[in-house]
Amino acid sequence: MPEIPVHQGWRTVPAGLFSRSQLAALDLPRVPGGPVRARVATRDWRDRKTTVDLYSLAESEPSPATLGQLEAARARAGASRVCGGCGARPDRPLPYEGLCRVCARIRQLREHLDKAAADRAHVVQWARGILTPDLLTPYLLRVTPVRRPPARSGRQNPEAIALRVDAVDTAGRRLVDATVRVAGPRVRGVPADAVDPDTVAEQIRALLAAPVVVTWGSREDAPLRLLYGADPLRLPSNRNDLSWRATYWRGDVDPDSYPFARRTAIHPGSAERMLLLVRRMAATEPPEGL
């Protein structure tokens, strides 16, 4: 006898499989008419792990209730089987406050879009503050590690052998554009244009000492701080990370995600383009009412 499949969570259960209680909750209830065809691993009302038997809808049969009993049950139930959003009358109970699944999904998506708009307004204010002339000149910094080429086995050494450092100020002036050698000059894979750390030490230390530095990720400049004697663990408490702010500004909600999530913003590719992104963020007019 073939082993009964077990599905992990209700979202993985194929169409046409119902539990006994789901069959009973149909608008015109049914009862299992065949053997257990599958099970679903889920949690009960006490949040304890459990499995639920699933039956084939095609093998089910009408419940023994009479027409009068069905009418009386509907009158006692009180809850409408008509969707308050679109007027649909599904076989299954309305799962979300009198809404069908589609209308509930639309409402949830609308709520998420409204939240995304509010988040965008906050990061727009942040971008405008970064570009305010009254501030000490902020810098936009990009640090990209360069690693050794993979070994013949395919194994990748995670340690950086060089750091690509790219920085501009909010006026667009180039401050640093160099590849700084971390490993010895004879180490395989070190870029030919890599320079000794002392060559750009003055410019980079000035960057690291600045009160406002915008990086893409929260610890992107940690290797640079370590290389130049700054404590990588003592980073400014008020970080100006651009990645999550750009994600909020773009507000690109993935409608197929569950729960709804925003697609992560893609790195612009250089400090100069990071500046362009911040300028576009600052120029955004928030929706009315925010």
Image (cartoon, rainbow, N blue to C red):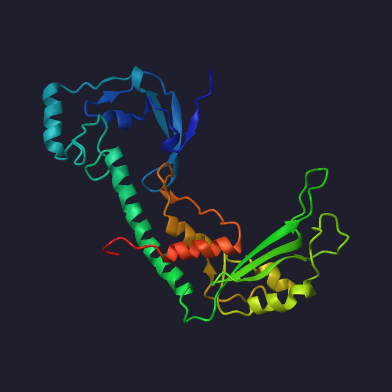
* Residue 208 point in image, percent of width and height: 64, 76
* Count of number-bearing discs: 0
Q: Quadrant of the C terminus?
A: bottom left
Task: Return the residue nearer the eye: 279 or 95.
Answer: 279
Task: Return the residue nearer the eye: 1 or 104.
Answer: 104
Left or right for 70, reference 242:
left
User: Which residue does the image show at 21% across and 21% down from the upper left?
Assistant: 64
User: Which residue does the image show at 15% across and 32% down from the upper left?
Assistant: 73
* Residue 201 point in image, percent of width and height: 74, 76
Q: Can you say whether 282 is above or below 98 in the image?
A: below
Visible in this render: residue 40? Answer: yes
User: Which residue does the image show at 53% across and 23% down from the upper left?
Assistant: 3
Q: Can you say whether 76 is above or below 267 in the image?
A: above
Left or right for 29, reference 234:
left
* Residue 160 point in image, percent of width and height: 75, 60
User: Which residue does the image show at 86% across and 63% down from the upper left?
Assistant: 185
Task: Return the residue nearer the eye: 19 or 143.
Answer: 143
* Residue 189 point in image, percent of width and height: 82, 54
Q: Can you say whether 166 is above or below 212 in the image?
A: above
Q: Can you say whether 169 is above or below 267 in the image?
A: below
Left or right for 175, reference 285:
right
Visible in this render: residue 217? Answer: no
Left or right for 185, reference 221:
right
